[in-house]
Image (cartoon, helix red, strand yellow):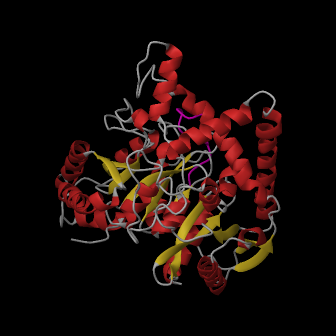
Amino acid sequence: MTANWTIDGVKEALAAKKISARELAADFYKRIEARNPELNAFLTLSKERARRQTDKIDALVAGGKPLPPLAGVPVAIKDVISTRGIKTTCGSKILQNYIPPYDATAVERLEAAGAVILGKTNCDEFAMGSSNENSAYGPVKNPLAQDRVPGGSSGGSAAVVAAGLAVASLGTDTGGSIRQPGSFCGVPAMMGSYGRVSRYGLIAFASSLDRIGPLATNVEDVAAILQVIAGRDPHDSTSTTAPVPDYRTELEKPVKRLRLGIPKEYFGEGMDAGVRKKIETGIELFKKLGCQLIDIRMPHTDYAIATYYIIATAEASSNLARYDGVRYGLRVDDDSLLAMYRKTRGAGFGAEVKRRIVLGTYVLSAGYYDAYYLKGQKVRSLIAQDFRDAFAKVDAILTPTSPVPPFKLGERTDDPLQMYLADIYTVTGSLAGVPGISVPCGRIDGKLPAGLQIFGAPFGEARVLQLAHAFERAGGAAV
């Protein structure tokens, strides 16, 4: 059977009756059984739900009826996205037995388009992390180098695609959690504009930043998944009414003469020499494709990490207050209500989540709100203005996805600041609400992948995908 399936490959094989949807799912479950024990990328499998969906697809094939766009495509879902009847833990002990009564809109739309949900992928607890080492259920290993992290927090979603355990997956991105794992695992990974994909059913970390997006083996498949999950949802008041373009058609538009901004602030100190070399080579490839490279300035970039960790932790502190042992999730009983709260949250949350709750509570507290949270929101506006100013001059912005290649497991767990700095190039787009994609950009010393990040103007996903597709087709993954 095909080792690396694509969406079109699956659909063609089903239509030609070379394989059934049920057989394809069974093949993927065999792959998972063989590799997941070493990677720890899947937390829960949904075989019964997958069987029901494959039977529907096979019935369409047998009846000669048209197949939906993702017919039979095996996909994986990050374990912070609600799935009806399937355990959804957020990588946390506090939700270790939680089973949602409803599907997230993105999951609902995937299944309506014919996708087969294989299961739920491991992630940093409540999506808080840059290495997938914060999960209560153990770290995920990078399938390209098992002594390395896969990136976080969507490390499981990136790892299953890179390892061929799913054709595509959904991750979530709050400050880089789709793009950075995509970079570390060598797969395309897309964050749409804030509001482009419904957040209904996404268990919240930081509500003004969280986004759901696709990871896949190629840019065309990323576009196909985004096409299905994007669009207005009445369940999410922040989802946009802006029309969804035909992303796959837009891929084929020429990139010649497009203006690409190169911000000086993203190429400063702290970038690994191997990463720098690959990104500079990737940027030169765009020049060969006929694009115009323009130097730009984004002066507030240096404040992005501090701003992000003020705003994100403040929102996390508020969002995670609901996990108190009263309504759902873990409960550690005690004689007094206060002691029950304390023991439940103490036992249920891991160290990184506790650290962010404490920091967020502090910046929201009386006497500090104006000094930290309010000021953070003002700086966020300045960072967004940097992007608006840039897009008045250029069509897209090129940067590294991460300043470093995948680092070793355990290398940064005792140094939270170094861990946070892994997101230095991704948090800016998160704060500004713009779309971004990470595309593979060669291997450092022929081994560890690097990722090139492409930012677009708000709701300019089509342009971002168009450039990423052109780069991929020109051999960008092998520069």
Farthest bottom residue in view: 288
Q: Quadrant of residue 289?
A: bottom right
Q: Where does the C terminus fall, quadrant-wise?
A: bottom right
Q: Where does the N terminus fall, quadrant-wise?
A: bottom left
Foreground of the two, 455 or 332: 332
Give coordinates of residue 222: x percent, y percent.
47, 61
Residue at 69% over, 49% down: 308
Foreground of the two, 423 or 99: 423
Give coordinates of residue 397: x percent, y percent.
69, 68
Q: Is residue 206 visible?
A: no
Q: Left or right: 122 with respect to 449?
A: left
Give coordinates of residue 32: x percent, y percent.
26, 58
Residue at 57% over, 63% down: 437
Q: Is residue 83 visible?
A: yes
Residue at 33% over, 52% down: 42
Q: Quadrant of residue 69?
A: bottom left
- How many numbered circles are shown? 0
Q: Left or right: 328 with respect to 43?
A: right
Residue segment shown in magenta: 232-245
Relative to 128, residue 329 above or below: above
Looking at the magenta stretch, what is its main secondary structure?
loop
Relative to 419, residue 470 above or below: below
Residue at 59% over, 58% down: 419
Foreground of the two, 437 or 322: 322
- Magenta highlight on residue 241: yes
- Magenta highlight on residue 118: no
Q: Left or right: 163 with respect to 192?
A: left
Give coordinates of residue 66: x percent, y percent.
29, 54
Relative to 119, residue 15 above or below: below
Farthest top residue in view: 335
Relative to 265, residue 171 above or below: above
